[in-house]
Amino acid sequence: MTWADFDPGFTLISLIVVVSAFFVVRAQNMIHAVLWLGLTLLGTAAFYARLNAPFLAGVQVLTYVGGIVTLMIFGVMVTRRHESLEAEAATVAPERGLIFASAIFVMLSVVMWRSAATIPSPAPVASSADLARVLLNEYLIAFEALSLLLLAAIVGAVVLARRRDLETSPQGPVVPQATEVQP
Amino acid sequence: MNTWLQVLTLDLAVAAGAAVVLILDAIGTVSGRALGWLTAGLLAAVLGASFVVDVSGTVPHGVYVSGDWVLFFKRVFLIAGMLAVLGSIDWLAERTPRRQAEYYALTLFSLTGMMVVPGARDWVLLLVAFELMGIPLYVLAAWAKTDGQPQDEKLGPEAGLKLFVTGAASSAFTIFGLGLVIGETGSTAISALPAQPTQLTFVGMLMVIAGLGFKLGAVPFHMWVPDTYQGAPTPFVAFLSVAPKAGGLAALSVVTLTGWSAHQGLWATAIAVIAAASMLVGNLFALPQTDVRRLLGFSGVAQIGYVLIALGAGSQEGVAMALFFIATYVFTNLGAFLVVHAAAQASGGHETVKLAGLSRRTPWLGASLLVFLLSLAGIPFVLGFWAKLFVFVAAWRAGLSGLVVLGVVVAVLGLFYYLTVARSTFMAEGHTAEPVRAPMGLKVSIAVCLAAVVGLGLWPRPLVDEANKAASSFLQKR
Amino acid sequence: MTLASCLILSAAVLCVGIYGLLTRKQAVAMLLSIELMANSANMVFASYGHFRGGPSAQVFVLFALAITVAEVAVGLALVMLLYRRHGDTALDLASEARQ
Amino acid sequence: MSAVTLGLIATFAPLAAALLLWALVPLRHRGAPAAWVTLLGSVIALAASVKLVIDRLGGAPDVRTTIPWIEERGRAMAELGVQLDGVSVPMLVIVCLVALCVQLFSVAYMHDEPPRAFGRYFTLHALFLFSMNVVVVSPNLLQLFAGWELVGLTSYLLIGFYFAKPSAAQAAVKAFWMTKLADMGFLFGLLVLYVNTGGFEWTAVPGTAIATWVTALLFLAVVGKSAQFPLHIWLPDAMEGPTPVSALLHAATMVAAGVFLVVRADPLFAQAPATREVMLWIGASTAVFAAGLALVQKDIKKVLAFSTCSQLGYMVAALGAGQAFAGFFHLGTHAFFKALLFLAAGSVIHAVHSNSLDDMGGLRKKLPLTTAAFVIGALSLAGVPGFAGFFSKDLVLGALEGKASWVPWAMLMGSAFLTAFYMGRVVIKAFWGAESEKAAHAHEGGLAMTGPLVALALPSLGAGFLGGWLATQVRAEYHLHLGLTPIAASAMALLGIGAAIMVFGKGGQAPLVGTLEKLDAFSLVDKTWAGAYRIGLLGVSSLAGWIDRYLIDGLMNFTGWAALEGGASARKLQTGLVRDYAMLVVVGVLVLVLIGVLR
Amino acid sequence: MNHLLATIVAAPAIAGAVLLVVPSTQRLAIRVVSLLGALVSLGASIQIALQYDRATGGLQLLETVPLVPSLGIHLKLAVDGWGVALLLLTGVIIVTGVLASWSVERRDKEFFLLLLVLVAGVFGVFVSQDLFVFFLFYEIAVLPMYLLIGIWGSSHEVPASGPFKFAWRRFAVGSKEYAAMKLTLMLLVGSAAILVAMFLLWGNSGARTFDLQVLEATKFPIGVQHVVFPLVWLGFGTLAGVFPFHTWSPDGHASAPTAVSMLHAGVLMKLGAFGVLRIGMVLVPDAAAWWAPIVGGVAVVNVLYGALCAASQKDLKYIVAYSSVSHMGVVMLGIATLNAAGWNGAVYQMVAHGIMTGLFFALVGLVYERAHTRAIAKMGGFAHVMPVVAGFFTLACLSSLGLPGTAGFIAEFMVFAGAAKGANAWWAVPGVLGAFVTAVYVLRACKAIFWGPAPAGEYSHLEDVRRTEWAAPLVLGSLLVVFGFWPRLLLDFIDVASQGYLGRLPLVALAQVVTP
C-alpha cells in the first residue's frame, strides 16, 4: 500500500463511521447516543454508495436511519427516567470491554489483511435489476420466509408491548394462585 | 420432481396454521382452550401428513433439498411442538387467557422456521429460517408477565431479555461471519467453497458456528439457559429446551457437513472444544441447583455436549447417532419439564424440595419423572441410555476417545443431581398426600413422552433405523 | 481503498459494538451496540459485493437489514416490558434469576 | 458287616441322633426322650466299635476307604473317609464308652434342668460324639482337622450351656478363641503340607525341613487343644460348663485329641526331631506348672482341670520323647480315670450343690460309693502301683529316661509327687474330716449316676493290663520291667499321698501355698492374653474402624464435597447480569476465532 | 433349544410387570405374585443345574436373539459352570428374600417391584454371554438399590470427626439418603470404568462385537489389556468391595432393609467379583496375570482390614457389612491366585458367603424388627426369648469364621490352599489371620446379643421366628451345612468352568504355580 492508494473519500467515511460509533457507545445521554448512531448509519450509507451500491445506500437510509433510529428514539423516550438520564447511560468495566474488543479486532484485522489485502480492483457491480431478479428466483423461499419473520416479529412485539395488558378470564381478573388443583 | 410448493407442503401448512389461529381468534370463532386443541390437532395432522405426502425433492437453484433427513427433523419438530402445545393449553387458559392465539401462532411461526432449517442449502434461506425460529422464542420466553409467585413476576421479561441479548449478539456475529464466508466464496450456496479457502473463510465459519452454539445452548453461549428456563412459562420451556436445539443441530449439521466436510479438522476441533466445555460446565453447574428448571437447564447444556461429540465425529454414523440422541432428548426433556410443570402447579414452586412426595401424591407422575431422569442420566433400558451409548460408540469409532472418557466420567456427576431430584420425588415425605391433578392436555403429552421413552428404550431399533436413513440421505444429497 | 481496508473498517465497527455490548448498563444502549454490530456485518457484505461482484452479497444485506429490524422491534418491546416491571431500563435490574 | 460299615455306623449313629433331635423340635423340647435318643445313638456307636475290637482280636486287618470331598481340576484335592487301625479302633471304644457313661450320668445329673435345655444338652452331646468320632476315624489330616474344629464347636456350645451366666458365656468364647488361635497353626500346617506334598496324608515324606515346619505348626494346635502352656488358660475357665461335660470333653476326650493327633501323625513327627524337642519341654513344664496350680484351687473341678493340664503335659512329653505309644496309652487310661474323677466330683457337687472344697468334708459316710469311685480315680491318677494310671505313667516316665540330661524326667517325677499330693488334699478335704454344713443332706444319686461310676471305675482299676494288647495294635514295644523309673514313680506317688495325709489330715496347709496362690491369683498368663486381646486386637481394630470411617470414607466424602463446593463456587459465575452473559458470548467467539487464526 | 435361561431372567421381570396392575391394596396378592416370580426363577435355576452337563462343561443352553446387530450386540444367553452355581444362589436368596420381606408394609408394591427388577438384572448378568448385555443387566441390578435403600432404609447418627470433618455438613452421614447416594454413585463410577473398558475391548476386537466368546478368542494387544484390566478390576471391584472402594458397603448395607441387604451382600457383591473373574481374568488373561499380585495384595488388605474394622463396630449391621468386605476379600484373593483351587474357592466363597450373609441379614432384620435397635450394647440374653434366631445366628457365625462342616470352610480352605500354591504363598497368612479375627468378632457379637441373663423390660417379650420368617433361616441355614459337608454339589459345576478358563492364562503365570 502506497500513497497512491490513499483514498480520501474512504478515509473520511471511515473516520465518520468509527468516531460516531465510538460516541454511540460512550455518549452519556441516551438521546445523543441514538443520534450518533444515526450518524454512523448515514456514514455506512455513504460507504455503500462509495462501494457502488446505491440501492443499498438508499435502503440503508430509509430503513435504518428512517426506521430504526426513529424507533430507538421512541424507545428511549418511552422508557426514560428524566431525573437520572445521565447516570443511566454510564458505562461499567470499560477496561474489560476494551480488552475483548481490541483482542477480537486485532485478530480479525490480521487475518483480513493477510487474506484480502491482495484484492485490488473492484469487479463489475450488480444492478438493482439483478437484485430484483435473484430475489424472486433463488431467494424466493427465503423472501417468503422473511415475510413470515416480520409478521412474527410484529405479532410478538405487539403482544409484548401491549399496555395495560389486564389478564382477565371471562369470569374476571385472574388472581395469581398457588395451585390449580381442585381439592 | 416435485414443485417447490409440494416440497414445502408441511412447512406451508404450519405457517398457514399460524395465520388461521390468528384469524380465528380475531373473528372470535374459536377461542380459549379450543385454540390449543386446534393447534395440536393441526400439528398432529401435519405429522400424519408427513407419512403420506411425498415431499422429497429439490427446489430450483438447489436452495432447498428435501428427503429423509428433512422428514426426520420435521417430525421431531412437529412432535415437540404438538406435545408442548398440549402441555400449554391449560396454563395459558388460566394465566394469560387474552393472549392465547398469539402464543400458538408464535409457536407455529417458530416451528415453520425450524422445519425449513434442515433442508436449507443456501445461506440466506438458512439464516432467515433460523431467525424465524428464533425471534418468536424471544417473545414467548417473556410471556410470563405474571406467573405464579410475586417474585417470579420480574423473571418473565428478564427471561426474554437474556435470551434476546445473547441471541442478538450471537446472530450479529453469525451474520458477520457469514459475510466473510459468502464474500470469500462468492456464492450463497452453503456447499460452495473456494478450492483454496483463505484463513478469513475459516474465521468466518467459526463465527457462524458460534452463533449456532448459542441456539444449542452450548458453553460458552449457554448463560441464558438457566435464567430463561427459570423465568419463562414452563410448558414453553419444555418446547424451548428441545425443539430449537434440534433446529440448531440441524443447522450445525448442514453448515459443517455440506461442503465443509473436507475441512473437518477445523470445525471438529471447535465442536470438540465446545462439547467438552459443555459437558463439564453443564454437569458441574447443575450440581448445586435447587430449582428444577435451572437444574434441567444445566443438564441440557451437558446433554448438548454429548450431541456435539457425535457431530464432531463427522461420520455418517455420528450424524445418525446425533439425530437419535436429539430425538430421544425431545421426548425425555419435554416429558421431564411437563411433569415438573404439573407438579409445580400443584405445589406452588419449582424448587426441588417442592417435588417432595410427588410419587406418593400421584404415583404415575412420580414414576414418569423418574423414568425421564434416568433417561437423562443414561441408565440402561430407558431411551437415554441408548442415546448416550450410540453417541459414544460413534465418537469412539471416529477416534474421539478422550471425549468419550470425559463424557463417561462427568456423567457420574450428572447422576448425582438427577438422583437428587429423584430423591426428593420418591423418598422425601411431602407436606400433603393430595394427588396432583394434571389437566388433560398435560396428561396426554406426558403419557406420550413416557411411552416413547420406555417403548423405544426397550426396543430402539425403529428410531435407530430412521436416524440412519436420515443421515445417509443427508450425506448423499448434501 | 482495498477490500482489506473495507473489511478492517467493518471489523472496527464490530468491535466498537462489542465494546458497547460489554460496557453499557442501559438496555437501549445495549440495543444500540447490537445495532452497530449488525451494521458492521452488512458492511462486510457490501465490501465483498463491491470487490467480488455478483448480486448475492447485496441481496444478503437486504435480508440482514430486515432481520435486524425485526430483532430491534422485539428487543425494544422487551425493553419496554422491563421498564414496566422495574420502572427502569438498567439491564442489571434483570438479574433476579441466578442462584 | 464290614469294618468300614461299622466305622461309619459308629460315626454316624450319634449324628443321626443329633439331626433327629435338631429336626424334631417337639422331641427335643420334651427333654427326657431326647436323652434316650442320644443314648441310643451312643449305644449303637459303642456296639459298633466293640464289634470292631472283637473283629480285630479275630485278626481283622487295617482298613482305609476314602471318597473325594473337594475337587480341583477334576481331581480330588481332599478326601473324606474312614481309617480303622490299631490307633483308631481302641480310641473309638474309649471315646464311645466314656461318652456313654457320661451321658448316662448326665441323665441324672441334669434332671433339674428345664426340658428344653435338657434336650439341647443331649443334642449337643450326640453332636460331640459324632465330631469326636470323625476325628478318630479320619484317614487324613484334613478330615481330622474338620472333626477337630467341630469338637471345638461342641465344646464351645457346652461350656456356654449355662449361657445366662456371663461367666459361662465368657468362658465359652474364650475357649473357642484360644483354640481357634492355636488352630491357625493346624491350618497353616495343612497348607504347608498340601503345597509340598499335594495332599494331607500323615504318611507323607516331605523331608526334614518341611516336616519340621508342618509338625511345629500342628503342634501349635495341640498346645491349644490340649491346654498346654501358654495356651492352657481356657481349660480352667471351661469348668463353667456342666460337670459331665468337663468329664467328657475337658478331661477324657476332646483335650486328648491333641495327643491323638500327634499319635496319628507320628510318621510326620518322626521326621521332625526339633519339634519333638520342643514338645518334650513344653509337656514337662506344663506338667509341673499345672500340678502346682492344682494344689491351691478351692474349686474341686478346677483342681481336676489343672490336673488334666498336668497329665496332658505328661502325654505331650512322652510324645516329645518319641514314644507315641506311651502317650497314647496314658491318654487311654487317663480318659477312664479322669472321667471317673469328674463324674464322682459331679456326684459330690450334685449332692452338696457347691463346687467349693470348703463346702465339702466328711462325705465318705453320706456318699460311700462316690467316695470309693473318687478314691480309685485319685489313686489311679496318682500312679499308685496296680492302678491303671500307674502303668501308663510309668511308661511315660520310662520314655523320658535319659532324655535331655534327665531334666524332663526329673520334672515329671516331681510332678508325680505333686499329683499324689494334691489329689490327697482333695480326697481328704472332701471325704474325710468334719462334716460340713452343706454335706448334711447329701445323698447318693440314682442308678443313672452310680452306674457310670462303677462302669468307669473298673477300667480305671484294670485298664493298665491292656497295655500289652494296645501295644501290639500300634506295633509298639511294651514290656513291664522293674527298674529305676517304676520304683521312683511308685515312691513318689506313695510319698505324695503320705505327705498329703500328714499335712492335710490335720487341716494344715502345704508349703509354698501362699506363693502359688499369689501366682494363681495373679495369673500372669491369663492377664497377658487378656492384654494382648484388649490392646492388640481391640486397639488395632478400633484404629482400623476409625481409619475406615474418618480417613478412607472421609476421603470419599471429601471428594463429593469438593465436587459440590466446586459447583457451588462456580455458580457464582452465573451472576445473573446480562452484560456478563454477553461477555461470555464474546469470549466464545474469541476462542473460536483464535482457533481459526492459529490454524 | 429350551428357554430356561430366558425364563429365569424373565420370570421376575414378568412378575414385576404383573405387580404393576395389581392394586396396591391387595397386599397378599402382591406378595404371592412376587413369590411366584421368585419361585419360578428358583425352579428354573434348579432345572438348569440338572440339565447342565457337568462332564462336558463349557457354555450350555445357548439362546441368541440379535439386539443391535449393527453394533455387534446380541441377546446371547448361555450358562457356564460358574453361572450355574451363582444362579442357584440367586434363586435361593430371592425366594428367601421375598419371604423375609413379607412384613414390609410401607409402599410394599413398589418395594417388591424393585426387588424383582433387581433380581432379574442379577440373573441376567449370570447368563449373558454378550458383554454389552452383561453390562446392561449389571446396571439394572445396581440401580434399584438407590430407591430400595433410600425409601425403605433406616438412618442413624455418625458423629463428625477426623480430618474431613468439614465435609460432614454437606452430607447427612449415616442417613439412608446418604447411604443410597454414596452407594449408587460409587457403583456407577465403577460402571463408568467398566463402560470404558468395554469400549476398549469392543474397539480392539477386530470383529467389533460384544460377543464374549468372540472376545475370548481375540488376542488383545498387551497395551490394551493393561488398560482394560485395571478398569475392569476397579469397576467391578467397587461392587465387590475392593479396598479402598468398599466404603459404600458398610453404610449401604447398614441402611438397607432386610431383603435388600440380603440380596445386595448376598448376590450383588458377587456380580462384582464375577465380573472381575469372567471379564477381567478370562478376556484379558495376560494383563490379568501381570496384575494378579496387586489384586491379591489388595484382597489381603480387604480380608484383614475388613475383619478388623468389623471388630470395632458397635452396630450389628455394620459388623455384618464389614464382614462382607472381609469375605469378599477372600473371593478376590481366590481370583488372584490364578489356579484352579483358588478360582474354585473364589466361586464357592461367592455362594457360601451369599448364603451366609443372606442368613445374617435375615436374622439381623428379625432382631431389628423386634428390638428396634441395632446397637449391640443394648442387647443381651436374646437367646432366652428367640432361641431359633440365636441358633441360626450362631450357625451363620460359624460359617463366617470358616468352621468345617459349613460352606464357609470349604470355600476359605480352597482359597487359602490356592493362595499357598500360587506365586505369593504369603497371602495365605493374612487370609487365615483374617479368619481368626472373624472368629473373634462374630462370637463376641453372638455372645453379646444372645447370651447372658434373660432380657428384662421391653425386650422380655420379643417374639421368635414366625411363619414366613422361617424360610430364610431354615433354607439358608440348611444349605450352609449341606454345602459344607457335600461341596461337590456345586464344585462339580464350578470346577469344570475353572478348568476351561484356566487354560487361557499365559504360561508364565501358570509356571509360577508350584505343582506338587
Image (cartoon, coloured by chain):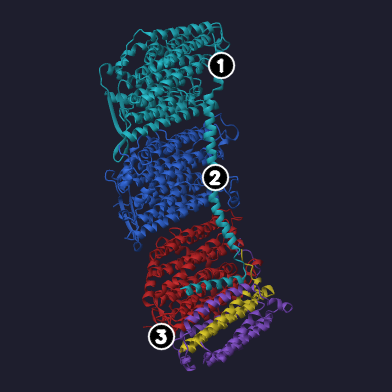
Chain colours: A purple, B red, C yellow, D cyan, E blue
Q: CA distance from mark 2 to mark 1?
A: 48 Å
Q: Which residue is mark 3?
A: B61
Is residue D23 at all visible to an observer of this figure?
Answer: no
The chain letter for the residue carrying disc 2 is: D
User: Is label 2 in a helix, a strand or a loop?
Assistant: helix
Is the residue A85 above or below the residue B456 in the image? below
What is the three-letter code of the residue carrying label 2? Arg
- Location of the C terminus of chain A by quadrant is bottom right
Residue B175 lies, in percent from the top left, at 51, 80
Q: Which dot marks residue E318?
A: none
Residue D549 is labelled as 2
Q: What's the amino acid at mark 1?
A: Thr
Q: Label 3 amino acid?
A: His
Tell me the tag on residue D515.
Answer: 1
In the displayed orientation, state which residue is furthest to the right. A83
**Residue E211 location (% of width, % of height):** 33, 56
Toward the front, the furthest residue is A2
